[in-house]
Image (cartoon, rainbow, N blue to C red):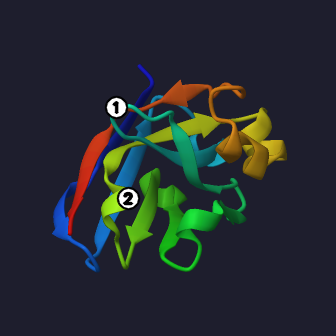
Amino acid sequence: EVQLQASGGGLVQAGGSLRLSCVGSGFTFDDYAIGWFRQSPGKEREGVASISKSGVTTYVDSVKGRFTISRDNAKNTVYLQMNSLKPEDTAVYYCAADRLGALRSSPLLALTYPDTYGMDYWGKGTQVTVSS
């Protein structure tokens, strides 16, 4: 059974940090690009960051310099280190895996238009709440 499990969310004050984890199982994890996406109530889903199977990273402008995505293929895990958190970062964060699609070939497009480009697998989300 394919699973992607996101964890590490919580409540943090503005300026604080959190590290999210995304653990994959049931598929060849290191063959896939992995992306982080987020959605808050009343808003469309938006991309945050992605990492290719070789470790090339892509970020949307709103998180550049604050968030860092990394992967440990030995642990089938991708991390999202979030620093200098802002109230507008509050959302449910999801990870997704994509082997041959846009997250691999055009990651910035896939992050910018997540509902246009499908992913192979989605995980359940983890809530991040940043208080002001």
Residue 69 in the figure: left or right of residue 82: right
Question: On the image, numbered disc 2 is attached to which residue?
Answer: 89
Residue 126 in the figure: left or right of residue 114: left
Q: Amino acid at mark 2?
A: Asp
Which image quadrant for residue 102? top right
Q: Is residue 45 above or below residue 65?
A: above
In this view, the residue farthest toward the top is 1
Residue 20 pos. (x, y %): 34, 58
Quarter in which the N terminus is drawn: top left
Q: Which residue is located at x 54 percent, y 27 percent?
A: 121
**Marks 1 and 2, how far apart at CA:** 18 Å
Q: Amino acid at mark 1?
A: Lys
Q: Which of the numbered marks, if any, corresponds to residue 96? A: none
Residue 62 pos. (x, y %): 56, 65
Q: Earlier in the sequence, mark 1 or mark 2?
A: 2
How busy is the neighbourhood of tag 2: few (under 14 within 10 Å), some, or many (20 plus)? many
Question: On the image, numbered disc 1 is attached to which residue?
Answer: 124
Residue 16 pos. (x, y %): 25, 78
